Image (spheres, rainbow, N blue to C red):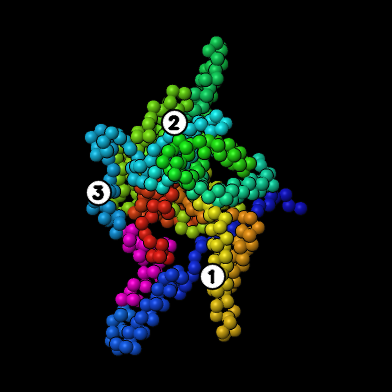
Amino acid sequence: MSNEPTFNTYGNWRRPRSTGLLGATFGTSVAAILAAAAVIIAGLFLGMTVALLLAIPVIVCFIPLVISRDGRSGYERALMRFQFWRGRRRGEHAYASGTFSRIPGRAYRLPGVLGETELYEGIDSDGRSFGMIHMPSRNAYTVVFDAYPQGAEAVDQDVIDHYVGNWAQFLSGAGETSDILAVVTTVETLPETGIELYETVHQNTRADAPQLARDAAYQLATGLTSGGIRLAARIAITFEAKTTERKQDPSEQAVELGRRLPALTASAARSGVPCSPMDADEIMAFVRRSYDPASLVDVEAGLYSGEGTGLTWEDCGPRTALESADGGKYVHDGAVSVTWEMREAPKGAVTERVLQRLLAPNEAVPLKRVSVIYRPHSAGEATDIADSDYRNAMAEAHGGSLKNGSIGSAKSQIELAATAQARMEQARGAGMVRFGVLVTVTEPAGSSDVPKIDALVEDLSRQSRLTIRRSWCWQGAAFAASLGVGVIAPDHTTIPSFLSN
């Protein structure tokens, strides 16, 4: 009899998509059919020469929609390159702040999409202070939680299954409330400074204790943390203000969020992730050290000593930031960051440990951030999507069998079974969530080796069964999105959806 533990598997992820001709989307296929009909009609009334002259540009325009690379159509890649080139021509790829910059009164404002944000602080119904990041253009408010995941060490498998089920309920509940735009979970590794443990020992050591005992406590605190890498985890929830009062007055939204935060933290705790709201000082601390890694020691010294960081939201941005000429890396305050995005979810079934190697500390990349972005659908949207996916899969599986008696491919039959299962689970009350992954690695500018990091991250992602791609031409925005401070990338896209593959 085997004593090896058994693991539950998870999967059946699908990208909602209406498939048309030659793998293009349904809308693109309809446009192609209409264009072909126009060419045929022109040939009937104006002659074959005119029809051929019309057919050539139609075919040329349709090819970039069919041929894709790295999960993007030709039009997507061309538009991204053009927009990046135009931004460089305008100087939008470079950011400089400070007293003599073009940002009057705001010395080190956050760059890019975070430039308009403001940070406020409120108190929830449990008496805890919480920071609230406001993005006025989206009427969005983001609250960040400091999380303490229990992990899988010395935990029975049935307890882990219970945690996974409760996390699914947490995300499903986020979809039931129509004002939650996104839930971002972030796990990052960073060098261990030892300041937190040292300050904890210092604050809990009596002044009249024997000198030998005090020295031993301080030496132990220093020895345990010297030269190591530690893990930090956060959960960020972005809410949309629904009423006019909450859109215009952040204090009104703070009252609403303060009422709901205790229930959210309790729900996360049932998922094995105890957490507490981060106050404004704690949010500013991790944002500042992310843009300026050299400030890590100073920020933590003020934060854990109880004196505060002394920062304001206008101090959290970088002194300089620059996107490289090829759009493949982000240089900021003496550091170089590269962000990768998930291109495709794991194709097969996986266990709850699938991201373990990607999340684990790695001495080759001490500054690493992995963010999983969840965007829950409302109950009405989930029903429509599940039914639409099922109809599309059924049409693909049985489209040609009614006329010639053929059977659908095995792949189409698997797709049909997957969509049918998702449809039934959704009808029984399960939620539907879109998700993606961003991986950011930061290194000192003088010693960075981007090709080596690229190969390492690609290898770690393959071990986690993820297919990733470099976030070409939007590294600055991807860096901000992976922080978990309210930047939801799809809400800021400038590429029309009908040009996607």
Instruction: Find the residue positioned furthest to the right.
Output: 1
Q: Residues within 10 Å of mark 3 (few under 14, many from 20)?
A: few
Label 3: which residue? 91
**Figure check: 409 above or below 189:** below
Q: Is residue 401 left or right of residue 69?
A: right
Q: CA distance from mark 3 to mark 2?
A: 32 Å
Q: Residues within 10 Å of mark 2 (few under 14, many from 20)?
A: many
Q: Identify the residue at image location x=53%, y=54%.
A: 377
Q: Residues within 10 Å of mark 1 (few under 14, many from 20)?
A: many
Q: Quadrant of residue 46?
A: bottom left
Q: Identify the residue at image location x=42%, y=52%.
A: 491
Q: Secondary structure at mark 2?
A: helix
Is 77 magenta? The answer is yes
Instruction: Find the residue positioned furthest to the front.
Output: 244
Q: Which mark is residue 281?
A: 2
Q: Which mark is residue 392?
A: 1
Magenta residues (range): 57-81
Residue 44 visible at all: yes
Q: Nearer the viewer, residue 298 or 285?
A: 285
